[in-house]
Every structure is written in structure tokens, then in C-alpha cells.
Image (cartoon, helix red, strand yellow):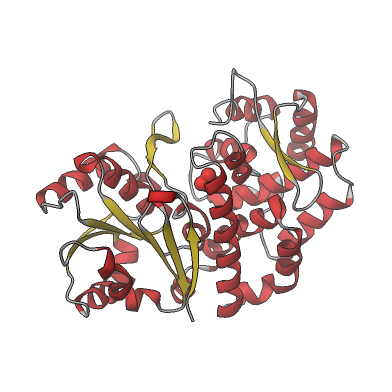
Amino acid sequence: MTHTVHVPLGERAYDIQIGEGVIATAGAFIAPLLKRPRVAIVTDETVGALHLDTLTRALAAEGIESVSLALPAGEATKGWPQFTRTVEWLLEEKVERRDIVIALGGGVVGDLVGFAAAVLRRGVRFVQIPTSLLAQVDSSVGGKTGINAPQGKNLIGAFHQPSMVLADIGILGTLTPRDFLAGYGEVVKYGLLGDAGFFEWLEVNGPALAAGDVDARAYAVRRSCEMKAEIVVRDETEQGDRALLNLGHTFCHALEAATGYSDRLLHGEGVSVGCALAFEVSSRLGLCSQEEPSRVRAHLKAMGMKTDLSDIDGDLPDANGLLDLMGQDKKVIDGQLRFILARGIGQAFVTSDVPRDVVHNLLDEALAARA
Ligand code: GLY
């Protein structure tokens, strides 16, 4: 069964189709968008080996011809060299203004291909086929596209909404448990930021979801996409409320920078640690009860997620070093750090009103606990 989440953005509106096996029927979903029966697919070598064949056959079944490019897998792909290669390949393949480009892959492919589509011939349409849980619940929806700069992650890019998102729940079964759980960090984030009932549902159903329950996975992806769509429609270009989607990310981005964007800490793992820290700060500032951070950590721990700085292997900077890294955060305004804090589970808000010493002391204690 396929569920549709509509993203009502006026002339940029689109549907997210969520279900088991949607890649095998991708041709039927994509055909109505096409002006001519030809698409260009960009994927990575790992995802391509697993799913490209299914996609090209699904397109061919509807009479759609396809050409494809497979980039190296991994975060290092998300920079100028592979971006240039992609744009020039799309031009060599004579992709026209009215054509569709398909991004088949996780967040790296989705972000890079979306950005390529944003600038190719001043903008062509693209379809996201996210193959990781993280991409299905977060990066494929909402139109943030881009690549990394030597100065930091996602610092070069554009808002460019996809024309459709096809989230195939079945292919989540091909993820490693670690990659799946990293994506789960973003799922929990939605409950924590705006839907206490969803967080309660995750407390009960999280283990089944991780074990492979397709209905539970479909519901979690659907609810996450509904929440993301609702926030994106309110604030497409992140002038305000969209920053709520960055719950846990101020800490996460500093920890990712501190660990060299390596597999010492995956993005979703950093989100999990960051959410636990954001609730701890909220409790220390008297915004929520002490039970709330304990409940957040208990669920993340029960799922086998990272929650503490002691869960990160290797050296980390001291508290001042981590605070300096937070200063690179895109949410900084006039040099002032902004945090997403919470008055309780499901009640997040954006604030600059966080005394530096509260964050410093928390980080100091968390680092001391690693010794
Ligand atoms: N991943 C955060 C956003 O799309 O705004």
C-alpha cells in the first residue's frame, strides 16, 4: 500500500509517495511528469549496484528511456569535483530544460543532484528517490540542496524543491543496522520537536521498526514527512520555524566537525547525542522537568543509539573548542549562537537566550565523564 504526503507549496507543490516497492513502479509515478520519455539518473556506486536495475526496468516498462551516472559512494563525493562532473555529464547527455533528473541514493546524492538540477540551464526539475532512512525522512524533502565547502558542510547550495519524492520502504532492509539507526535519530527528532504522541508511539514501536516491521517503518516515515512538510510550508527558506528541524544539530555539527565528518560519528548519531544534550540544557535552564532528558536518553539508549560524548571514540576538543565549532553553525546571527530547546517532549522552540556558561559546564561534565 502506498501513502501520499502532499507538500502544498503552490506552483512548487509535490507529492511524497511512501510504500514498499515504489521503485519497481517508479515509471508509472514519473511518466505523468515527463514532456518526452527520457530521464537522466544519478546514483552512487553502492546504491546503483543494488537498485539501479530495478529503477531502469520500472522506467522501461512505461516506455521511458534512461541514462545513468554512478558517483563514488561517501561524503567526500559532496564537493566541487563530483558536482562539476555531474553537471557536465548532464550537459553531455543533452538534458533539456523540460527534462527530469532522478537522484537515486542517500543524502549525499540527493543534495548534490538537487543542486546540479537547480543550476543546470538555470534550473531543471528533479525527482528524489531516497534510499536511506535519513534521506527518506529528512534530506529528500524540503528543497535544501547543496555541496560541502572546505570551510564546512552544506555551505554552497540552493533551495530547489523536487517534483516528486519516491520513498521505498522495502529498500530500507538493505541498510546496515548502523545506517538505519542513524536515520532513526532524525525520526525521533520529529517526535521531540513537535509531536509527543509520535514520540510515545516510537517508545512502543521503535524496536519492531528497527527489527524490520514494514508497517511500522512506513508509518514512521509518513509521520516524519508530514511534520517536515508542514514546517517547510510554513517557512520554506528558513527565516524562522524551519530552524526547529535543527533540534540537536548545533551540538551535532560541532561534534561532526570535531570528528572530521568521518565514520567516528554519523550525522544521525550526532543528532541523537545533540537531542539528548539539548534536552539537558533545557532542563538546566528550568524550561522542562528533569524527567524529560532522562526519558529522551532512555529511549535512545534502548534503541542502541549514541546519547553521550562518551559514546564517541577518540579524542574530542575541550568545552571551549566545541563551543568555538558551534560558532560555525549556519543558525548563528550576529555572532550569537542559536539553540533549539524544549519546554517538554514535543514542544521545541528557537532561542538565542542561552548563557554560554550553562552549555560550557554541561560539555565540561560530559567530557569529564569520558575519562
Ligand atoms: N534538514 C533540515 C531542513 O531541511 O531544514
Find the residue positioned furthest to the front. Answer: 10
Q: Identify which residue, 172 or 273, lies in the foreground.
A: 172
Q: Would you place residue 332 above or below residue 94 in this image? A: above
Number of numbered discs on residues: 0
Quarter in which the C terminus is drawn? top right
Counting from the top left corner in percent of width and height, residue 273 is at: 67, 48
- The answer, for residue 148, to whether it is visible in the render is no
> Is 32 placed left or right of 105 in the picture?
left
- The answer, for residue 113, to whether it is visible in the render is yes
Q: Residue at x 48, y 61 (%)?
A: 6
> Is 221 placed left or right of 152 in the picture?
right
Q: Residue at x 22, y 48 (%)?
A: 86
Q: Residue at x 33, y 64 (%)?
A: 46
Counting from the top left corner in percent of width and height, residue 25 is at: 33, 78
Q: Identify which residue, 323 or 14, lies in the foreground.
A: 14
Counting from the top left corner in percent of width and height, residue 105 is at: 37, 60
Q: Residue at x 35, y 74 (%)?
A: 23
Q: Identify which residue, 344 or 293, lies in the foreground.
A: 344
Counting from the top left corner in percent of width and height, residue 370 is at: 73, 43
> Is 93 placed left or right of 311 in the picture?
left
